[in-house]
Amino acid sequence: MKVIEFLDSKGVHYEMTQHRPTFTAQQMAAEEHVPGMNVAKPVAVLADETYYLCVLPACCKIDMDTLKKELKAKHIQLADEEGMARLFADCALGAEPPFGDLYGLETLMDETLEDDPFIVFQAGTHELAIRMDLDDYKKLAKPRVFRFSYHMQ
């Protein structure tokens, strides 16, 4: 998996855990015993002709209008499964890590993730999670940070 090789090559400290298969970021939060605000949920979007990787808390949804304005896009939509499989060929569908650069995408991080010192995310499978310091994540991912999500009720 690209993400583990990438983290190892950068010499960054991280912890990897194995859990029962989970298929949503909120399920992973429960399995890993962490709040949904600490789980970095990657969501690929297609803005006009460009894909972006949005990273937001598991318990939040993307405000598509805000994202559209920030990206100065005429049209924006979630990437479909075919696009996801093509973009993240080394990952199980729905278990993508939050590093757009690894896949040729700009990473957009919701600023609400900055409220805690660490994040947890899928490591390319539905059974592996990675926990790392937020500062290390930001150094590696180099995300554009702004608010584009809202908390699900």
Image (spheres, helix red, strand yellow):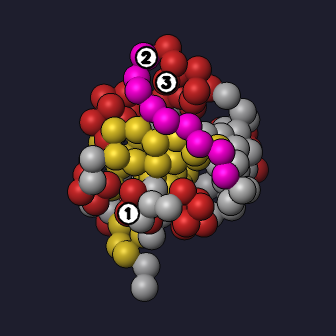
Q: How many C-alpha atoms fall within 10 Å of the one at disc 3: few (<14), some, or many (≥20)?
A: some
Task: Determine contact: label 1, label 2, CB under 8 Å.
Answer: no
Residue 150 percent location from the top left of the image? 35, 73
Residue 84 can be seen in this image: no
- For the N terminus, the image quarter is top right
Secondary structure category for the residue under label 2: helix
User: 46 or 6, which lies in front?
Assistant: 6
Residue under pointer 2: 10
Q: Which residues are magenta?
A: 10-19
Q: Is residue 37 left or right of residue 77?
A: left
Task: Determine contact: label 3, label 2, CB under 8 Å.
Answer: yes
- Residue at horizontal 28 percent and vertical 60 percent from the top: 112
Residue 4 percent location from the top left of the image? 58, 27
Amino acid marked by disc 2: Lys
Residue under pointer 3: 7
User: 53 or 75, which lies in front?
Assistant: 53
In which quadrant of the rendered view does residue 37 lie? bottom left
Q: Which mark, residue 120?
A: none
Q: Which of pointers 1 and 2 lies earlier in the amino acid sequence?
A: 2
Amino acid marked by disc 1: Met
Amino acid marked by disc 3: Leu
How far apart marks 3 and 1 lie (CA) works out to 22 Å
In which quadrant of the rendered view does residue 142 lie? top left
Residue under pointer 1: 37
How far apart marks 3 and 2 lie (CA) works out to 5 Å
- For the C terminus, the image quarter is bottom left
- Residue at horizontal 56 percent and vertical 37 percent from the top: 16
How far apart marks 1 and 2 lie (CA) works out to 26 Å
